[in-house]
Image (tube, rainbow, N blue to C red):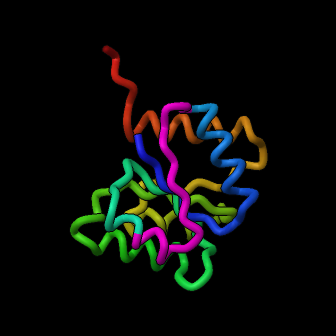
Amino acid sequence: MLIMLCDDDIDDIEIFQEALSETLPNTELLVSNSCKDLISALKITKPAIIFLDINMPEMSGWDCLRHLKSDPDLKDISVVLYTTSSSKRDIDFAKESGAYRLITKPDRFKDLRKVLSGILEEIAPPNPN
């Protein structure tokens, strides 16, 4: 399974990569440090899911989400907003904007692994065969 992460914080990227490799070791992760880079990469490859930080330079995660959901070729990709925010307003706006979910970046590594595992099982359940 191919997953994309769009985040500009190096520490958050490294933690995400490690948690993902421990949770689903056969998963490929592509990282973009800006929304513009993400959109360019999506012209070449389509992931099963995108984890998108809201607070990004140049183009916000909100603007990027609007762009993705308005593009007929990209609108069906599941997008999880991955942010430090936990406000009800942001959660509601994420749903209204077409995001699969908004998750607050967990403080603990094991919590991140648990969140990733749950979301990825929902998006692409393991094959029972």
Above or below for 23 versus 91: above
**Side of 61 where 125 appears, left or right:** left
Identify the residue at image location x=29%, y=74%. Answer: 70
Q: Nearer the viewer, residue 39 or 125?
A: 39
Residue 111 position by quadrant: top right
Q: Is 124 in the magenta?
A: no
Q: Which residues are magenta?
A: 24-40
Q: Nearer the viewer, residue 52 or 44?
A: 44
Relative to 129, say whether 40 is above or below. below
Q: Is residue 54 left or right of residue 100?
A: right
Residue at the outermost top position: 129
Q: Position of residue 26 (x, y in %)?
A: 49, 32
Q: Residue at x 63, y 74 (%)?
A: 55
Quarter of the image for the C terminus: give it.
top left
Which percent across, then down, holds residue 84?
Answer: 69, 63
Where in the figure is residue 28, as x and y percent of width and height?
48, 43
Task: Identify the residue shown where x is 67% and y is 56%.
Answer: 13
